[in-house]
Image: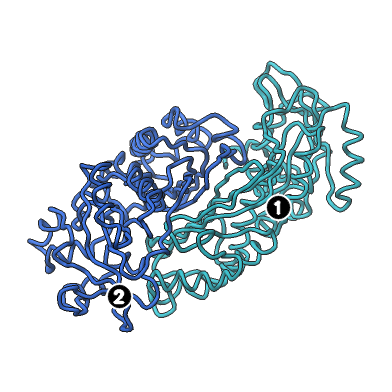
Chain colours: A cyan, B blue
Amino acid sequence: MNPFATSEKSIQLIGESALITKIRSWLGPVSPPTPYGIGDDCALIQPSTEVEVITCDSLSYGVHFDASLDAADAGSKLIKRNLSDLAAMGALPKCAVLALLAGPNLSLDWLESFFSGIRNSCTHYKLALIGGDLSAIAHNQFSAVLTLIGEGQQLCTRSQAAVSDFIYVTGSLGGSRLQKHWNFEPRLQEGRWLATHGDCSALMDLSDGLGKDLAALLPANCQAAIDLPGIPIAEDAHRIAKSSANTALEHAFMDGEDYELLFTIKPDKAARFEHDWQQHFPSVPISCIGQIRRSQCPANYVDARTGTDFMRMDGFQHFQHRS
Amino acid sequence: MNPFATSEKSIQLIGESALITKIRSWLGPVSPPTPYGIGDDCALIQPSTEVEVITCDSLSYGVHFDASLDAADAGSKLIKRNLSDLAAMGALPKCAVLALLAGPNLSLDWLESFFSGIRNSCTHYKLALIGGDLSAIAHNQFSAVLTLIGEGQQLCTRSQAAVSDFIYVTGSLGGSRLQKHWNFEPRLQEGRWLATHGDCSALMDLSDGLGKDLAALLPANCQAAIDLPGIPIAEDAHRIAKSSANTALEHAFMDGEDYELLFTIKPDKAARFEHDWQQHFPSVPISCIGQIRRSQCPANYVDARTGTDFMRMDGFQHFQHRS
């Protein structure tokens, strides 16, 4: 559905305050009453006894989605990609504020559908939308920025991975542009569980692709020895590989927007950890894809079987230049 | 200064992670180390014993500023207009996250200058920039969205004004587009003091113009009887009136971006309040511009001397249609 409309069906027809009233009615109970919601200069944040965290992510027409994506799925994607950042620290959602930057010809119908996706996701994940901003920008432009506050008793950062730790991912990777970039579940419960599980040393989510993101977990003077056959390849990565210049493995390693969790486990605890995981999340597969090793050479990743810097191979190079 | 540049001097030349490194160096100590800053999936928020509030505001090229504004002043404006929303509840700044939506041809030099304004304002107002997002949008487009968290022991909302309360504003109004839209001081200390002063019943800031904003303070079935000669007219409103179709008073009542405080005081406490104010803020004038009255007629504002609905006069009508 095209987000933009002729003037009689666009947001420029109604004033800002009427539009805010509409948005609040579209949001329903997801929009709490002031002072803990929209309607004053600021919104009060409910007090917390846990540690609070904050993250922020945007969604722009022509960049993160196009007219082929249902507006409700676009709204839902904005919420879920932010939630994935909370999952990546083991936090659960608390409240959010939303800034909309929209051309005057944005379609009211499209926007209502966009907010139905936001409302459904906020309801599902128990998230209150407590404030925001509306701003007019150029015609045919639309961006939304969500700032999300989460909380948790115990949080897990990216920075505590150590030599010999095993590297794991949830789910399967690659080919997300066919569908998964919007059709995914943020791994909130799994992240929360990992952050409180003493054997998990570092945790993050995969948004830019394993090949880019994993580097952030590596301690200084370390590299990841990757078990290439151990990388879980999504069916859509195989599908895309049939008509692309890359192999399915390359897509799994380099495509973005997987929204899976990437984490490290202390080596002597791996067997027990895998057993625990299976008990808690029997329907969510995990894969051990490698191990952290000390190294003096500049490559972040090597093939665990051969020791070669596989990122220098043709397909991977092609991806790196593209990104 | 034009925010956009030829390709060899634009942000597309350097990758996202190099740009984030540059931004952190431009921000200096305003950007605290992880986990209470940029560098992980979320940033931890420092614990607080006060009530936390949140607000969000954007700044877009071509809407809120143009090439005639110094880039540093644009950055500073983004911070200060958000701070004014904190002042409007009596909160003080705590931390912020910044989302940048930029065309690939955004100038690196311009962006560095923009961040110098952000850094200076954050330093001056004791604000930590703890997270954010970078996103590429269409060429020649630039928007920044700041989400700001503040805190206060005692906060004041818009909703407790009552019949007979006197209406006050700080400073002088109108003509902000000549300079004040970026060259202003958010009234943080004044807002904090008002929120803790028992005689102040309601508080907000003036961003859309007195004629629009004051309506938000009026209780149901009430109107504001305005002392029109009592409205403090800024010199720049007089300047603009010389070449516009409106009087200086109309500009003072209807122009936006004053970033002054608008508040109500219980009538029997007004004399004492004015004395207290003078003691605390001798260099910041306040003006009593009217009083809240019970009313059954639809007009939000009447001339206190004549009882007429002055918003129906030509100049005011012209403003209302424009907005």
Chain ID at mark 1? A
Image quarter hosting the C terminus of chain B: bottom left
- In which quadrant is the N terminus of chain B drawn? top left
**Real-space Cα separation, disc 1 to disc 2, in angstroms:** 47 Å
Residue drawn at (44%, 28%), measured in percent from left and top?
A: B28
Query: Could you tell whether A138 is left or right of A167 in the image?
Result: left
Question: What is the quadrant of residue B202 in the picture?
Answer: bottom left
Residue A251 image-quadrant placement: top right
Q: Secondary structure at mark 1?
A: loop
- Residue at 70 percent across and 38 percent down: it is A155
Give the percent coordinates (x, y) of residue B147. 47, 48
Along the line of sight, the residue nearer the viewer: A216 or A160 = A160
Name the mark nearer the viewer: 1 or 2. Answer: 2
Camera-side residue of A230 and B153 = B153
Would you place residue B30 above or below residue A68 in this image? above
Q: Which residue is mark 2?
A: B300
Task: Give the class, few, some or many, for how many residues have Cα within 10 Å of label 1's Cα (few <14, many ≥20).
Answer: many
Q: Chain of mark 2?
A: B
Q: Are marks 1 and 2 in contact (CB under 8 Å)?
A: no
Camera-side residue: B121 or A113?
B121
- For this rendering, which residue is in front, B276 or A30? B276
Q: Point out the residue furthest to the left here.
A: B242
* A82 relative position to B14: left or right: right
